[in-house]
Amino acid sequence: MSGSRSASWWERPAVFAVAMATLVALVISSAMVRDRVYAASRAQTQLLYIPDGAVLGRMALSFDALLADVYWIRALQHYGGTKRADSEEKSYDLLGPLLDITTTLDPRFNVAYRFGAIFLTEGYPNGPGRPDLAIALLQKGIGEMPDKWEFYMDIGFIYYWWLQDYNAAALWFEKAANVPGASWWLRSLAANTLAAGGSRESSRTLWQQIYESADNDWIRNEAVRRLTQLQALDDIDQLIGAAQRFIEQGGRPPESWEELIGAGFVAGVPVDPTGLPYVLDSSNGTINVSSASELFPLPGETLPPPQ
């Protein structure tokens, strides 16, 4: 009998691979169960113990893509759970770190870059209102995938819609147009942005192009929502005109829709494109969508996040 001992179980490559796969599966399963059980826990408990994507990547061996999926799910849970929370002050502090870890573990996670940027830019209280973090995330994606013209376009959109920096927006649309294989309309979009940036019609053109070029339903639905918000703004302009005519005739602002209906300036209680009545606030003379509407808040009306 030979004096050499047989290899221990952990020294056998096939057994080791199976064991590691089982371990990672258990970690993922337990993390997802934990998220369901403790979904309402404080934000600090929602992050895994190692908040560094590079470190996690080294520890995960060949399972970094699986861990990226876990962190992406956590990012979605953190964003969605915070957005739906009833608390007066909402904290999205973990969203940026979770997205950064996700894209460090899987640098070619296209959806995490694009959706993550949308989540980060959404104005408070529907999101953290951090276009700077969204731009940094997309630039990280460009560093990994410089051929993705959509990332350049998304940065241009952030400068256009959220920062109202139309020169920077046009520059990024132009950069997108210069990427081989980019959509033909980007160059004209850059010119239109320089000529009429900030106009409602220009905004409508931008969102229509995003809708037509969207590669998934989520972005397409977001474009539809923004186009519908622009329609609501058009409606509100007309309602303001009706209220102004009431003032000219009666010498005071209207106190309700019923007064405008009685004076013949509107046919009935006006509703937004989702079917909810517009809100006429006689105390400050404003007309807006209801806070219960999926269109709320309209562009330019987001609240500052809590300090």
Image (tube, rainbow, N blue to C red):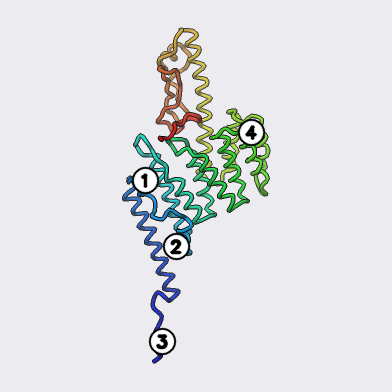
Residues at marks 1 and 2, CA–CA distance in whole angstroms:
24 Å
Q: Earlier in the sequence, mark 2 or mark 4?
A: 2
Above/below status of 43 relative to 228: below
Q: Earlier in the sequence, mark 3 or mark 1?
A: 3
- Residue at image coords 47%, 55%: 53
* Residue designated by label 1: 43
Q: Position of residue 121 (x, y in %)?
A: 50, 39
Q: Tell me the amino acid under the disc marked 1.
A: Ala
Question: SS for tag 1?
Answer: helix
Q: Tell me the amino acid under the disc marked 4.
A: Thr
Disc count in the image? Answer: 4
Which-is-in-front pick, marks 1 and 4? 1
* Residue designated by label 4: 193
Question: SS for tag 4?
Answer: helix
Q: Earlier in the sequence, mark 3 or mark 4?
A: 3
* Residue designated by label 3: 4
Q: Which residue is at the far front? A: 307
Disc 1 crowd rating (10 Å Cα; few below 14, some 14-19, many 20+) is some
Quarter where residue 282 is shown? top left
Q: Tell me the amino acid under the disc marked 3.
A: Ser
Residues at marks 3 and 4, CA–CA distance in whole angstroms:
76 Å
- Residue at image coords 64%, 29%: 196
Q: Position of residue 146 (x, y in %)?
A: 62, 51
